[in-house]
Amino acid sequence: MFSDGTISWGRITILFLFGYRIAISVLRTGFSQMIEKFVACLVEVIIREKITTWIAQQGGWVSASVYITHYFYPWWLSS
């Protein structure tokens, strides 16, 4: 997802949504012992791809809320 070197709020949002969906699936299927390993892998991606650095350079999570409000909130209301 980040192999081309491009980081964006959209890609970060998708990464966290993917992580959420996988975690819920793992819990529902009874493999709760895998959650710790999955979270460790997700954190590894976030560190390796320098996502935390990019977030800080963009103004932190406050800027994410501006992005989400601007791009997702209107769509969410119209659904």
Image (cartoon, rainbow, N blue to C red):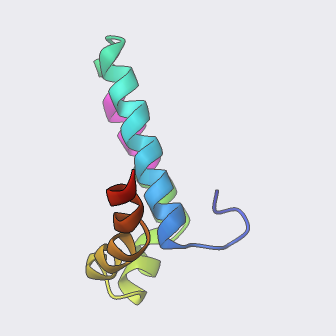
**Rendered location of residue 77, percent (x, y):** 32, 58
Residue 37 sits inside the magenta stretch? yes
At 32% across and 16% down in the image, what residue appears? 28
**Rendered location of residue 55, percent (x, y):** 40, 78
Asked where in the image residue 34 lies, by quadrant, the reply is: top left
Query: Quarter holding the N terminus?
Result: bottom right
Q: Main secondary structure of the magenta part?
A: helix
- Number of marks in the rendered image: 0
Considering every residue shown, the one lying at the far top of the view is: 30
Asked if 75 appears above or below 59 in the picture, the reply is: above
User: Which is nearer the eye, 43 or 72?
Assistant: 72
Asked where in the image residue 31 lies, by quadrant, the reply is: top left
Q: Is residue 23 left or right of residue 15?
A: left
User: Which is nearer the eye, 79 or 60?
Assistant: 79
User: Which is nearer the eye, 72 or 27?
Assistant: 72
Asked where in the image residue 39 lies, by quadrant, the reply is: top left
**Rendered location of residue 29, percent (x, y):** 36, 12
Considering every residue shown, the one lying at the far left of the view is: 62
Considering every residue shown, the one lying at the far front of the view is: 78
Residue 65 sits inside the magenta stretch? no
Q: Is residue 7 left or right of residue 61?
A: right
Range of residues picked out in magenta:
34-42
Asked if 58 appears above or below 5 in the picture, the reply is: below
**Rendered location of residue 63, percent (x, y):** 33, 82
At 47% across and 71% down in the image, what residue appears? 9
